[in-house]
Image (cartoon, rainbow, N blue to C red):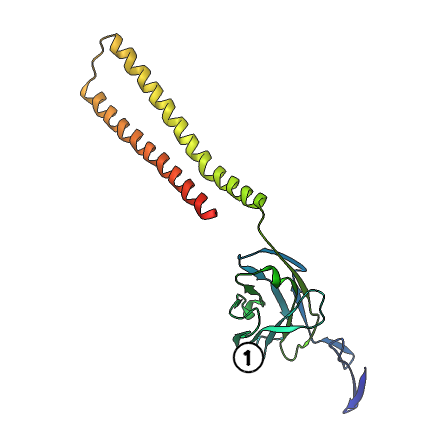
Amino acid sequence: MQQSGAAGGRGYALFPLLGVLFFQGVYIVLSLEIHADAHVRGYVGEKIKLKCTFKSTSDVTDKLTIDWTYRPPSSSRTVSIFHYQSFQYPTTAGTFRDRISWVGNVYKGDASISISNPTIKDNGTFSCAVKNPPDVHHNIPMTELTVTERGFGTMLSSVALLSILVFVPSAVVVALLLVRMGRKAAGLKKRSRSGYKKSSIEVSDDTDQEEEDACMARLCVRCAECLDSDYEETY
């Protein structure tokens, strides 16, 4: 639909569907750019972030509003799950009650939310709508959420990565400790055969070395305890 008129001999035309104002021969864009991930994958029981960002030609004011809606699979019915206008208003009814959290920042163009304790029943389409008067014309991006059970293969890969990050450094420390202990034993054996007696300085050095070896041994034990603790937390 196009509207036209005159104001003091000056013509203008308004294209509301496009968010474009034609005034004095100049096109002025009054619109928002909104972006969201087309597909998001999550796992049962693990918090999921639904990202939504926007760019507005106007400064953010207390009139800015954000609305998130949800549409179940194979359904045309949408329900409101979150509203924002100066304050956060997550839904207080339905399956998303007490599970929607605000993680955005309107002054940084962030309108993201998160879902706590997601389940397979949360699968569906989410939409993010932002209005920042006079910028009210915009696209409405859709995000398809897929929640699944975390498989054994995924858990195994996580444990394997954790093991590599913890076990490899520990193995290196143990190897260095064994090499040094081997060299020390060989040196002592050689000296004992030749009837060599240590000086007071060498005795002091040996004491320091023993303390250092004990420290490295305690470090190895600590690394092993961390590995066991992290492994238990994973399951």
Three-letter code, disc 1: Asp
Where is 44 relative to 136, above or below? above
Dot 1 crowding, Cα within 10 Å, few <14, some 14–19, many 20+ = few
Across and down, in percent, residue 20 comes to 75, 77
> Residue at horizontal 58%, vertical 80%?
63
Query: Image quarter for residue 225?
Result: top left
Towards the viewer: 152 or 228: 152
Across and down, in percent, residue 173 comes to 40, 31
Give the SS element for disc 1.
loop
Query: Image quarter for residue 216?
Result: top left
Query: Image quarter for residue 48?
Result: bottom right
Towards the viewer: 21 or 118: 118
> Residue at horizontal 37%, vertical 34%?
220
Residue located farthest toward the bottom when viewing the structure as drawn: 8
Q: How many marks?
A: 1
Across and down, in percent, residue 88 comes to 52, 74
Residue tagged 1? 62
Across and down, in percent, residue 53 comes to 61, 65
> Residue at horizontal 51%, vertical 69%?
98
1 on left or right of 102 = right
Quarter the N terminus occupies:
bottom right
